Image (cartoon, rainbow, N blue to C red):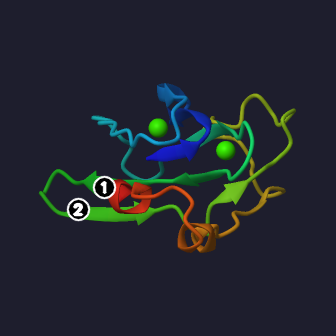
Amino acid sequence: MDVDDQYTLYVNGICVGSDDNWSTVEVYHVPCLYTKKNVFAVRGHNGGGPGGFIATIQIIYDDGSSEIVRTDTSWAVCANEEADREFMRMRFDDSKWVAATDVSGMVAKGAWPGLREAAE
Ligand SMILES: [Ca+2]
Ligand SMILES: [Ca+2]
């Protein structure tokens, strides 16, 4: 995953990692997920210029099968820096947030060279 420019990643309310270098891709291993529902939440900050968030989540089940979830416009976002401090919690209601914007067009214009391939 990566964010331009900074992020903190939470999984089910627990801080898993953070980074402040948009040109590096980070990989996190989260060993224990819930069976039915998990919340992946990111607090990101754009320090200027282009901004974006990309992630590929591979879920490996006990039977060895796996599933891939990627960031896309089905993710909910909130640009308000005063957003509820509980946004990373399982019980948080994001129904008033809006759909993420697809910034892949910025990749075509030269933003984040190499990051899309590295994040997949
Ligand atoms: Ca990074
Ligand atoms: Ca930026």
User: Can you tell me whether the CB of the residue at mark 2 lies under 8 Å from the nearest atom of ligand 1?
Assistant: no
Q: Is residue 74 above or below residue 93?
A: below
Q: Residues within 10 Å of mark 2 (few under 14, many from 20)?
A: few
**Disc 1 residue crowd, few under 14, some 14–19, many 20+, Cα 10 Å:** few
Quadrant of the drawing holding the C terminus:
bottom left
The image quadrant that residue 7 belongs to is top right
Report if the CB atoms under discs 1 and 2 are less than 8 Å apart: yes
Q: Measure the C-alpha gap from mark 1 to mark 2.
A: 7 Å
In the visual, does 4 lie left or right of 32? right
The foreground one among 95 and 28 is: 28
Q: Is residue 110 visible?
A: yes
Kind of residue sitting beneath label 1: Gln
Frontmost of labels 1 and 2 is 1
Residue 6 percent across, percent down from the top left = 60, 34
For the residue with label 1, is its CB less than 8 Å from the closest atom of ligand 1?
A: no
* Residue receiving disc 1: 58
Q: Which residue is mark 2?
A: 66
Q: At label 2, which amino acid type do we have?
A: Ser
Labels 1 and 2: the sequence-earlier one: 1
- Of 33 and 103, which appears nearest the observer? 103
The residue sitting at 39% across, 43% down in the picture is 25
